[in-house]
Image (cartoon, coloured by chain):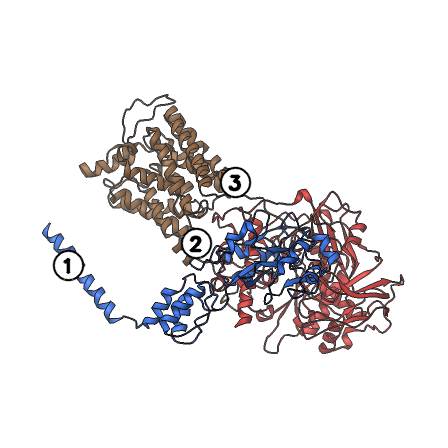
Chain colours: A brown, B blue, C red
């Protein structure tokens, strides 16, 4: 009796695609953005990134142990959450802020729901928003980039979006920099959180993910296009009060959000149509918050709000099943 | 300031009036006995009574459609409570517990093949009749564990289902979910059982299991009244359990087991309060 | 080049190079043939011979039982040495007739062929039933049932399935190349039975030689040859109909509801033999292949040949076998051993070595949506699997679990290596059990 043979249900071959591989590719895609942030803010950026990443992995392991689940740090999802969280923090973040963020992301954002695959909200964004509301001073202490420095000398500088909001609030008009600084924003020469620095670095990573078929085009295209068109309408109405679509594109966390946060598989719809709706909703909310909300930046809030709508979107975008009410050609 | 207080207060007042009105107007008439019976039931919604849940059963009992003694999990205490509510006399059925008639864990029983796939006994059984060489043996993939509403049956670390006789209420869900019929209900008062479910001939059983019943008849010879052998498989005659422990030591395959052995004595003490 | 196809599906490496250039070889008879009574979908045939009976090749050894059933015939001449439960490809012990070949391989003299032009549709259909013709693509659905649509279903197209989208398998490919005459003759007979003109052979474009050859030969017979995109499951009945005709079979219905009858190319060739020569279905072409086989081949085998004998004909095993699969890697059935016989539905024998087996444990679903995008029926496999896990049978039913064709695309692509098809199958079992109850 040969009882060492394997028996199973069909199919008997597998594509070789794995969760770890997907997570790894997303981490690779973030490398350009991480490098730009290191270049711009030097050692402090490195420390924030390390604390967040290692923190997330350690908290994941501890949570696994406490809940008697099998250890899931090898799938790379915790490390990815850590990097994404770091990219959402200001370079001046103190160590405790980063560590607290990691704890919130993994414990409250993910593990209490049952771990990978069960969390309704993007863990990194949950952490960012909790920190932003709880520690508004530390979370908005922006400084000017200081190339490859070992410490930030505290020359404070507002983010482009902050400047725009402030200008409109105080003078009713957009400041000059909004029109002239586009190239700097695009390349990463402005203030902001670690991952908001360079639109081009994020775009590179996003294109890599699209090329590797890790993410599908639906969400980023719908998101970015909606932002361009919706903000473009306001800009055409009054260009002195509303910034141009390009400004919206290259500032803040839009690229990071569109390519890396709104494409998080766990918390977004599963069908192409659902992703289009998701991206559209994110785009509208982002522009509304940026132009009319209390915060200068709305990407995180927009994505979190749409995360909440994901089950609903999934429900109403079920694909039409083969042979259901098929048109019969006689 | 005053406007807002008035506004909010007004909204609150109107809402509470509406709610109060709706509660009175649309109240559903409930037989008070039905509610009382529902309170008396364990609330596990296990389905042992044949209804979808406890409320269905409570309704059926209140309306007299079902007998009050069908709730096995509740046992005699629930029955007494229901009888008191309905003002009737009712006789309790003898309490039963689930018994896993298999000791062939991963160390003692041979596999038929290496199973890959869904961790579920019913799914595995569909593939060449299950991964265990014994056609009746416990597959250990935990269908019973998942369906048990009382957390009373678990797969041990050697891949065998084990019943916690203290927690088991005899609802029978595990019995119906097991694809191999390894689990059966037996009177709780009987603690000695033949733990094997293989009807194969002795020579074949020996090939795949170290603790399988080979139908050698020794137990029956020791306690003629207490055991019966059918298709090469011994089982206890639950109606005549006197003296059946005498065969335990005689069984060459060690497949007769007494749950009341000193080590486990506490586990089988009747505990109606739990 | 834009080829016809369907929406969804994927393209696993086809791994056909093992055997696609190997000409069909006749497999010598084994020492004993084990012919199970259960070889087709429907009611198993009823064994009508006993131990010691002498049979000829083509003698009926089991009678059809009911409409959806076919008779089974002896695959060679010899003596019945046992009628007993034997290992069946399903992994169960099922009744079988064991025949010891006498070496003559002589056909039963009572079998007579004829010219299809002399017979009417009804007589042809009877002959097809008597010869035990079943779908040779793997599902083994009795051919005469498909050829007997109710009067209110108007059939206008016959589709011949030469897609062979399962990786590794090349039996149909070789048949189309080497036995095209039988194939075309069979198609003509099938057209006559159905009383229709239009016949289409669908072939995946990774078999250009077969497309070229049949394309040339079919012109004279007005049979269309349609090259199809290389995509799994292109050869699934519903997907093939969609690709070729643009019609969809309504949910829960049969191809005949879309005006189409689909037959495998091998079935058509077998129909030709049944009518012209009177020969029942006692042999078929099967691919013996995989990394665990020394010398992969396409063999013409007698029904009932033990798998071990097939392996021996192909130079034996390489390394330690890990999985023995009857059929293709996407929908085939794993075997307990090489003891079971090849039956009418055996399109191939695929052997993986121990090191080829993926034994990773399944992780949690990350809702990546890949299963949703590849499902050729456009179901949401991850949702259905979740329903199955929670035993939500009614929900699974309303999410159309019964429409699943179990092609395996979702499980193939799943990064969490979840056994999605198995879960859906479990839910389907639950739905069917519930329906039987009510």
Badge 2 is on which residue? A273
Snapshot quadrant of residue A125: top left
How far, Cα to Cα, is label 3 from label 1?
57 Å
- Identify the element where label 1 is drawn: helix
> To which chain does the residue with label 3 belong?
A
Snapshot quadrant of residue A101: top left
Towards the viewer: A126 or B87 = B87
Q: Nearer the viewer, mark 2 or mark 3?
A: 3
**Same chain shared by disc 3 and disc 1:** no
- Identify the element where label 3 is drawn: helix
- The answer to whether marks 3 and 1 mark residues whose Cβ atoms lie closer than 8 Å is no
- Identify the element where label 2 is drawn: helix
For this view, does A184 lie left or right of residue C86? left
Badge 1 is on which residue? B10
Numbered label attached to residue C390: none
- Asked if one can make out residue A37 in the rendered structure from this viewpoint, the answer is yes
Quadrant that contains the C terminus of chain A: bottom right
- Within-10-Å neighbours for mark 3: few <14, some 14–19, many 20+: some
Numbered label attached to residue A20: 3
Q: Nearer the viewer, mark 1 or mark 2?
A: 1
Towards the viewer: B55 or C231 = B55
Q: Nearer the viewer, mark 3 or mark 1?
A: 1
Towards the viewer: C274 or A49 = A49
- The answer to whether marks 2 and 3 mark residues whose Cβ atoms lie closer than 8 Å is no
Q: Going 22% across and 36% down the picture, which residue do you hit? A: A166
- Within-10-Å neighbours for mark 2: few <14, some 14–19, many 20+: some
- Within-10-Å neighbours for mark 1: few <14, some 14–19, many 20+: few
In the depicted structure, whether residue B33 falls above or below residue C165 = below
Snapshot quadrant of residue A171: top left
Q: Earlier in the sequence, mark 2 or mark 3?
A: 3
How far, Cα to Cα, is label 1 from label 2?
44 Å
- Asked if one can make out residue C4 in the rendered structure from this viewpoint, the answer is no
């Amino acid at each position: 009796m040969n009882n060492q043979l394997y028996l199973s249900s069909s199919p008997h071959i597998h594509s070789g695609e794995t969760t770890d591989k997907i997570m790894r590719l997303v981490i690779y895609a973030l490398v350009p953005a991480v490098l730009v942030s290191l270049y711009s803010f030097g050692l402090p950026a490195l420390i924030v990134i390390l604390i967040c990443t290692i923190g997330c992995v350690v908290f994941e392991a501890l949570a696994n142990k406490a809940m008697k689940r099998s250890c899931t740090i090898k799938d790379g999802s915790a490390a990815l959450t850590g990097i994404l969280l770091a990219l959402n923090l200001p370079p001046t973040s103190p160590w405790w802020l980063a560590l607290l963020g990691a704890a919130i992301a993994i414990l409250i954002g993910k593990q209490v729901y049952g771990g990978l695959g069960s969390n309704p909200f993007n863990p990194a964004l949950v952490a960012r928003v909790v920190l932003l509301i709880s520690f508004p001073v530390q979370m908005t202490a922006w400084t000017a980039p200081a190339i490859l420095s070992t410490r930030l000398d505290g020359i404070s500088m507002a983010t482009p979006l902050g400047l725009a909001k402030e200008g409109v609030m105080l003078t009713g008009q957009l400041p000059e920099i909004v029109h002239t600084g586009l190239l700097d924003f695009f390349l990463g020469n402005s203030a902001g959180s670690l991952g908001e620095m360079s639109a081009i670095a994020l775009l590179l990573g996003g294109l890599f993910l699209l090329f590797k078929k890790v993410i599908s085009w639906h969400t980023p295209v719908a998101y970015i296009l909606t932002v361009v068109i919706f903000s473009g309408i306001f800009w055409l109405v009054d260009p002195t009060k509303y910034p141009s679509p390009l400004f919206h594109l290259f500032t803040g966390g839009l690229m990071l959000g569109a390519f890396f946060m709104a494409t998080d598989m766990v918390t977004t719809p599963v069908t192409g149509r659902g992703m289009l709706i998701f991206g559209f909703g994110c785009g509208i909310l982002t522009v509304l918050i940026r132009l009319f909300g209390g915060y200068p930046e709305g990407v995180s809030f927009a994505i979190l709000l749409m995360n909440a709508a994901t089950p609903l979107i999934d429900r109403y975008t079920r694909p039409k099943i083969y042979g259901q009410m098929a048109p019969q050609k006689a | 300031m005053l406007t807002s207080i008035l506004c909010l207060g007004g909204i609150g007042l109107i809402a509470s009036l509406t709610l109060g009105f709706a509660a009175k107007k649309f109240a559903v008439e409930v037989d008070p006995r039905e509610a009382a019976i529902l309170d008396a039931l364990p609330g596990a919604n296990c389905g042992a009574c044949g209804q979808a849940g406890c409320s269905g059963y409570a309704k059926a009992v209140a309306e007299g459609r079902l007998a009050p003694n069908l709730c096995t999990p509740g046992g005699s205490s629930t029955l007494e409570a229901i009888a008191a509510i309905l003002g009737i006399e009712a006789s309790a059925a003898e309490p039963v517990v689930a018994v896993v008639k298999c000791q062939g864990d991963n160390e003692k029983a041979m596999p038929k093949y290496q199973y890959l796939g869904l961790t579920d006994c019913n799914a595995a059984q569909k593939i060449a009749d299950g991964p265990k060489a014994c056609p009746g043996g416990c597959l250990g993939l935990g269908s019973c564990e998942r369906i048990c509403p009382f957390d009373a049956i678990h797969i041990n670390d050697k891949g065998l289902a084990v019943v916690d006789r203290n927690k088991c209420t005899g609802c029978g869900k595990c019995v119906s979910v097991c694809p191999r019929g390894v689990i059966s209900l037996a009177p709780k008062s009987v603690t000695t059982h033949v733990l094997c479910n293989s009807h194969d001939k002795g020579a074949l059983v020996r090939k795949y299991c170290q603790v399988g019943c080979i139908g050698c008849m020794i137990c029956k010879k020791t306690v003629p009244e207490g055991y019966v052998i059918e298709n090469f498989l011994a089982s206890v005659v639950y109606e005549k359990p006197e003296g059946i422990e005498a065969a335990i030591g005689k069984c060459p395959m060690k497949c007769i087991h007494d749950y009341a052995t000193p080590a486990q004595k506490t586990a089988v003490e009747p505990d109606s309060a739990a | 080049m834009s080829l016809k196809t369907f929406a969804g599906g994927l393209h696993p490496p086809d791994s056909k190079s093992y055997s696609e250039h190997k000409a069909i070889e006749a497999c010598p008879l084994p020492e004993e043939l084990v012919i199970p009574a259960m070889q087709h979908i429907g009611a198993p045939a009823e064994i009508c011979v006993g131990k010691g009976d002498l049979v000829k090749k083509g003698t009926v050894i089991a009678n059809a039982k009911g409409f959806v059933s076919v008779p089974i015939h002896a695959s060679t001449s010899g003596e019945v040495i046992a009628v007993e439960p034997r290992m069946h490809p399903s992994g169960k012990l099922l009744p079988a007739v064991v025949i010891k070949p006498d070496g003559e391989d002589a056909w039963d003299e009572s079998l007579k062929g004829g010219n299809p032009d002399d017979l009417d549709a009804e007589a042809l259909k009877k002959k097809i039933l008597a010869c035990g013709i079943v779908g040779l693509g793997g599902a083994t659905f009795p051919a005469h049932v498909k050829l007997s649509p109710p009067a209110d279903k108007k059939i206008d197209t016959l589709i011949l399935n030469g897609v062979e989208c399962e990786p590794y398998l090349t039996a149909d490919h070789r048949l189309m190349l080497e036995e095209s005459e039988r194939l075309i003759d069979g198609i003509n007979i099938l057209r006559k039975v159905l009383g229709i003109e239009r016949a289409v052979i669908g072939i995946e474009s990774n078999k250009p030689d077969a497309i070229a050859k049949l394309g040339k030969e079919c012109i004279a017979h007005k049979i269309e040859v349609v090259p199809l995109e290389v995509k799994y499951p292109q050869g699934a009945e519903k997907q093939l109909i969609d690709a070729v005709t643009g019609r969809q079979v309504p949910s829960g219905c049969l191809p005949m509801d879309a005006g189409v009858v689909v037959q495998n190319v091998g079935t058509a060739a077998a129909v030709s033999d049944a009518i012209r020569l009177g020969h029942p279905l006692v042999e078929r072409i099967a691919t013996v292949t995989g990394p665990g086989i020394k010398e992969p081949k396409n063999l013409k085998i007698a029904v009932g040949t033990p798998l071990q004998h097939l392996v021996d004909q192909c130079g034996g095993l390489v390394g330690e076998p890990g999985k023995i699969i009857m059929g293709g890697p996407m929908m085939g059935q794993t075997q307990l051993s090489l003891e079971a016989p090849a039956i009418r539905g055996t399109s191939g024998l695929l052997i993986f070595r121990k090191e080829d087996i993926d034994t990773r444990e399944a992780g949690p679903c990350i809702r990546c949506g890949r299963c949703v995008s590849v499902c050729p029926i456009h179901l949401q496999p991850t949702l259905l699997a979740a329903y199955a896990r929670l035993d939500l049978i009614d929900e699974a039913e309303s999410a159309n679990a019964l429409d699943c064709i179990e092609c395996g695309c979702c499980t193939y692509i799943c990064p969490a290596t979840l056994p999605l098809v198995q879960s859906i199958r479990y839910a389907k079992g639950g739905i069917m059990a519930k329906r039987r109850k009510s």
